[in-house]
Amino acid sequence: MRDEMRQRAWKAILSNAFFSLESALIIALSIVLFGLGFAPFEAWQAWYWLVFGALAEALYLGVTITDPEANKKIVNQMLSERFDPGTIRNPAARDRLKRALDYHRLILEAAARFSGPTRRSIETTADEISDWVEQIYRLAQRLDSFEENPIINRDRRMVPLDLKALRRRLERETDPAVRAELEEAIQTKETQLANLRNLENNIKRADIQLDHTLSALGTIYAQVQLIDARDVDSARTQRLQSEIREEVLSLADTIAAIDEVQSYHKAANGSL
């Protein structure tokens, strides 16, 4: 994900610089002066304007694409567009995603206070947090999917009632063949109910985990504020990045558990 984001960011930065007003003026001016054949002195050749324009454009692009403030804004914009909080309908999950994006932006701003190895180290930490933001976004999507899935909502209401009805029938039934079918149906419903409860528990866990994640992000941001140039060679930034990776893996595990139960539930419904 991070490599893809870097490539997209680099293309966006270059594109923004090339299609900027300043770039257009440099190109237009060099072409106009070439077309007019304007010569500031006798030895000047008209085609020199094209060379001058190309060099000026290259210099402008070089300065622009290495501008840390411009790059930071583009990376933040891309992250917000890719993981748009507006697409999340659960209000609490949407708010958490917004706050995660804010922390990412603030950590990049913290990096801008430094230069050299310290800056690169904090920017690497911000890269790790972009993975974190992705997992928060995916988890928020799972919460939306759970709350708005009509089949799951129906089954959460009906399966316990169906199970009670089947058990009552089994208590009254005397025919061995019918009892065997009822027992099999009860076992299927019990499995379905167990998976629904497992899914509900995973969703509750996900909701709690999002709260924990925001607290952890706040802690990471506070720790970044304490970094100074001497910390770049210390264990502080390595420890931060290690903590972030652990959180990313934990969120990914929760997402995988939700997906696994939902897939099983879909398959079970398809076979009923």
Image: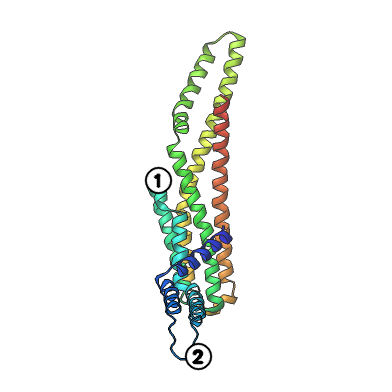
- On the rendered image, what quadrant is the C terminus found in? top right
Query: Nearest the camera: 214 or 105?
Result: 105
The three-letter amino acid code for the residue at tag 2 is Ala
Please indicate, yes or no, whether residue 257 appears anywhere in the rendered image: yes
Give x and y (percent) for residue 107. Answer: 46, 67
Q: Which residue is mark 2?
A: 43
Give x and y (percent) for residue 11. Answer: 52, 64
Query: Nearest the camera: 91 or 213?
Result: 91
The three-letter amino acid code for the residue at tag 1 is Asn
- Figure quadrant of residue 271: top right
- On the rendered image, what quadrant is the N terminus found in? bottom right
The outermost residue toward the top is 175
- Figure quadrant of residue 243: bottom right
Task: Name the residue located 58 percent from the left edge and 67 percent from the top edge.
Answer: 239
Please indicate, yes or no, whether residue 209 appears anywhere in the rendered image: no
Circle 2: element type: loop
Task: Name the residue located 51 percent from the left edge and 80 percent from the top edge.
Answer: 47
